[in-house]
Amino acid sequence: MSAESRILKNLDLDGAVELCAELVRIPSPIGQEKAAALFIADKLRSIGVDEVDLIEGEPDRPNVLGRVKGKSEHPGLMFYGHIDSEHVLDGWTVEPYAGLIKDGKVYGRASKDMRAGIAAFVKVTEAIIKSGLKPNSDLTLAFCVDEETAGDKGIGHLVELGLINSAYGLYGETYEFGEIMVADSGTIWFELTTHGVGQHTQLDSHKRHGINAVEKMARAITELQKLDLAYEEHPLFKGMRPCIYCGTSIESRVGMHPCMIPEQCKATFDVRLVPGQDADEVLKRIIGILDGLKAEDPEFKYDINILKKREPTQVPLDHPFLVAAQECIKEVSGKDAVLRGHEMTSDQAYIRSAGVVSVHLGPGNLLAHKPDEYIDIWQIKQAAQIYAKMAARFLF
Ligand SMILES: [Zn+2]
């Protein structure tokens, strides 16, 4: 019997659905993921995962890292996803943390985003262990916090510690099921500070010597909005363009009172890029604009602090891992997979930056973070079968 047949024979699909509901019953809103992380870690130990560690990027927010040891040290396959979830707001007609199973669906906060993917990964791991086959290389499991916010304390922390060394990665995050996210947009976040001179306001005269840092910021925003983000349209990002969001947050000092000229203004900016663009090169253009303002206006003084820089990434369309993912989707669902670029950013960007060839392929759809969140049971089951087939191909 082939490895694939043995794994599929041991794959408990109903168990994946039950585990999804069980996980929904452990709330894990952003910053309060510990109970869910401990539960998942215990689950991994109980099914026989060789190594299970809890690694904190900040206190009380553990990430779960598991490893099923392979025969060799060669980089293997990784299943990964996030534990944190959005808070529950108004508008729910079902109990958000009851894990209700009804009408072919599992209801509850995080059911789709992304307990379903985690449950499928855990049950495939269990099936591999139960099959009695030892993988050729390690199977790594990473279920992390901080995806909904930035990722630095979650998967980004594990990457920074050098703990991610898989060759391939499957990311079980929700998106339109049957679509594969093969490219991620890039991001530059920066904070710009303009400096002025504080002074009490008064009638204009020779005594006026204050310099309004907010006016300097306004000038910078006006010019940065003209940033040339020339690009070639990317086939995976049809109709989507790179862009800059200016002043996503803004604050001034001493301008707490209407009668004070602010001496300092800080604003954040968010630049979104498509594959083919180079974040460093774009950053140089941004600094060029700011230096141009300085040359024109000796009173324009600024500092720039780069908060985050992620290059856009893409898996080559003929890569064997991506081709296999398309084949597995077709075998399980009977449908052709759709390849797409991701208009936002996710934990996958960190994993790709660590050199892992990763695809984002999860049960669910785009309507995340809404009241009465649910996941279709058939999607949990099909996702588990796809992951099992991929594991058979890339671990044995
Ligand atoms: Zn998510």
Image (cartoon, rainbow, N blue to C red):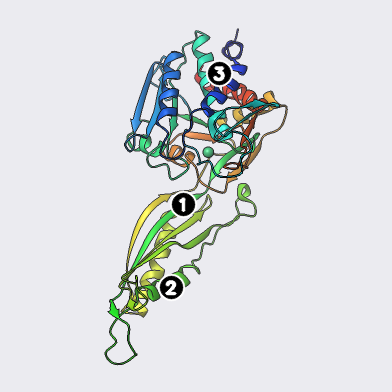
**Circle 1: residue type:** Thr
Which one is earlier in the sequence, the residue at label 1 or at label 3? 1
SS state under label 1: strand
Tell me which residue sits at (45%, 24%) in the image: 40
Which one is earlier in the sequence, the residue at label 2 or at label 3? 2
Residue corresponding to mark 1: 187
Percent of width and height locating residue 237:
61, 50
Which one is earlier in the sequence, the residue at label 1 or at label 2? 1
**Circle 2: residue type:** Ala
Cα distance, mark 1 to mark 2? 23 Å
Quadrant housing residue 141: top left
Which of discs 2 and 3 lies nearer the camera? The answer is: 2
SS state under label 3: helix
SS state under label 2: helix
Cα distance, mark 1 to mark 3? 34 Å
Percent of width and height locating residue 86:
51, 41
**Circle 3: residue type:** Ala
Residue at the far right: name it. 334
